[in-house]
Amino acid sequence: MAEFNQVVIFVTVGTREEAEVIADVLLEQNKAACINIVPAVYSHFRWEGKLETRQEALLIIKTQTSLVEEVTNLVKTVHSYDVPEVIALPIIGGNPEYLAWIDTETETA
């Protein structure tokens, strides 16, 4: 199996507006090539011993594996939650040209 250097990171936030702020920060700093915002997801979770249900927005962030820590730190700086969800999943395949584009767009000067 080929090795790939890209990941997809999921981040949930309280509002679409907050999602857009986080997306702008990551894109402006070349930490992501593309970010999809799903404006409404319904999250069910346990927080501080209680069951919670919330409507949130979901960011789907495409970036390089080497940038996961930087993305995580930036999200934590901007995010309104005490413990934001930041989950990175490896990309194990896909369109080679698209994956190369992710690398090109996230290269730092």
Image (tube, rainbow, N blue to C red):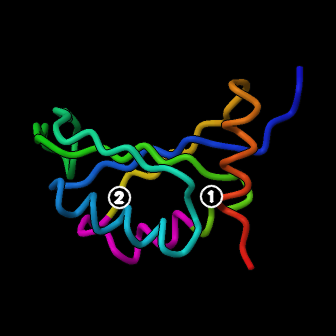
Residue 44 location in percent, x, y?
Answer: 19, 32
Residue 9 location in percent, x, y?
Answer: 51, 46
Q: Nearer the viewer, residue 79 or 97?
A: 97
**Image quadrant containing the C terminus:** bottom right
**Compared with residue 42, is residue 72 higher up or lower down, i.e. above or below?**
below
Q: Which mark is residue 84?
A: 2
**Displayed quadrant of residue 82:** bottom left
Element type at mark 1: helix
| Residue identifier under label 1 | 68
Is the residue marked by circle 1 packed among few (<14), some (14-19), or many (20+) residues within 10 Å?
many
**Displayed quadrant of residue 105:** bottom right
**Compared with residue 103, is residue 93 higher up or lower down, i.e. above or below?**
above
Name the amino acid type tagged 1.
Answer: Val
Name the amino acid type tagged 2.
Answer: Pro
The segment highlighted magenta reads 71-82
Q: Nearer the viewer, residue 86 or 52?
A: 86
The residue at the point 21 percent across, 48 percent down is: 47
Disc 2 and disc 1 in contact, CB within 8 angstroms = no
Q: Is residue 57 left or right of residue 107?
A: left
In magenta stretch: residue 36: no
Which callout, 2 or 1, points at the residue further toward the start of the chain?
A: 1
